[in-house]
Amino acid sequence: TKQVPGAREVAARVVVRVLRDQSFAAAALETELSRAAQLDARDRGLATELVYGTLRVLPWIVAELDARAKKPTESLPWEARAALWVAAQQIFFMRVPAFAAVDEAVSAVKRAAGPHVAGFANAVLRKLAAAPKPERALAVVASCPRDLRDALERALGEEGARAFVSETEPPPTGLRVREPGARAGVMKRLAEAFPNAELREGRVSPLCIDARGLGQKPQSLPGWDDGELSIQEEGSQLVALAIGARAGESVLDACAGRGNKTGLLALSGAEVDACDRDPRKLDRLREDLARLRASVHATHAVDWSVGSGDVTGAYDAVLVDAPCSGTGTLRRRPEMLLRPRAPLAERTKSQRAIALAAAAHVKPGGRFVYAVCSVLREEAEDVIEAFAAASLEPAPFADAATNEVAKGASSLRLLPYIHGTDGYFLASFRKR
């Protein structure tokens, strides 16, 4: 009979897909969990913890395994390697009996590579189990590439960089309600429907509910079909709120993507134009706006790095959430530590070009917000220093919630270890 996969095997499959197939961890995990419908909430949580925990310290784990092995583990089949990695994560960093982690991993290796390799795995893992338990923070820092650590230290200082990379717990699901006054009622309904879920109000967005343990896709939650609920990470919500869109204004969402921020802007009653380089994302955007019972004035496929395309108007407010390294999303995308990164100087140049092209469409006296889901100086301060030449002057954020978090400043870094959000940089300007 075919063996039903448990949480550890599901986690190992996800890790293989991330490393071998270059999949995103979150998408691969969702797919594998949907296939493993037999897992209860506890096992689903274990699989999630194993995936994110293993990927965040994988370079360190590989080094520890290879130091105790007679041959490099990279010579093993992918499935065998992943079983070893997941077992090492449990042995070193989780409250799991070592024998349970070892036994299940050895069985998985035997299925993947035969009894000889299983014997090898058993010997290596038992050596790990006998070793002193390390401090996880040291393993996390050691697994962060040196160039990224240096960039984080330039932006956040040594302590801030360590705190940033040490945020390894998988983040909650960010839910967005239509308006601040609806949040309490929605939370009450969710708590009644899912008594075991963890629900809390967001720290920085008045629209946010952070949820854990819902046990199903948010798209099946009460309130989803009628547009009362959307999925949007809390920091992303604040980025959209920061522009302070108001009814009757014209607003340009220059880098709209699939439209999470566009939807929030449209619900303000503003007349919103949405742009993205990928027309397929604009199609998805229109579909989700229909669910919200909202719409945009127009959509344009635009590559701002080479010009404005067919955008010709001037707007009361322009939001540029520029393409970036995504380092602010590290806690939900641990795979980025394991992949090549574009040189930061190239990103800085591209982000300046995009921002300045979009800023040309701000009316005199109008508002402009630049944002990235990155915390690095090269994508933040180093980009906005060029804005003075475009007649943009730093100004307080137009949104009260953003101003409260920014403490009156015209720029803001959102950080997971301070605000509970993903990492972002936002800066607010007025057009002279």
Image (tube, grey):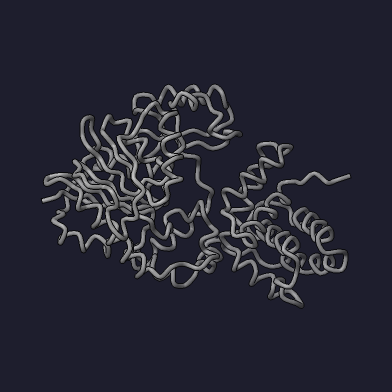
Quadrant containing the N terminus is top right
Q: How many numbered circles does the render carry? A: 0
Residue extending farthest to the bottom is: 70
Residue 15 location, quadrant: bottom right
Horizontal and vertical percent for residue 415? Answer: 38, 52
* Residue at x 32%, y 60% (from the top left corner): 305
* Residue at x 58%, y 48% (from the top left corner): 27
Q: Is residue 108 left or right of residue 409?
A: right
Horizontal and vertical percent for residue 28? Answer: 62, 50
Horizontal and vertical percent for residue 298? Answer: 31, 38
> Where is 420 relative to 333, above or below?
above
> Where is 378 relative to 27, above or below?
below
- The residue closer to the viewer here, 136 or 224, is 224
Residue 316 location, quadrant: top left
- The residue closer to the viewer here, 214 or 357, is 357
Residue extending farthest to the front is: 310
- The residue closer to the viewer here, 1 or 140, is 1
Q: Is residue 425 left or right of residue 410?
A: right
* Residue at x 66%, y 43% (from the top left corner): 33
Horizontal and vertical percent for residue 134? Answer: 60, 65
Q: Is residue 3 left or right of residue 355?
A: right
Q: Is residue 197 left or right of residue 353?
A: right
Residue 327 location, quadrant: bottom left
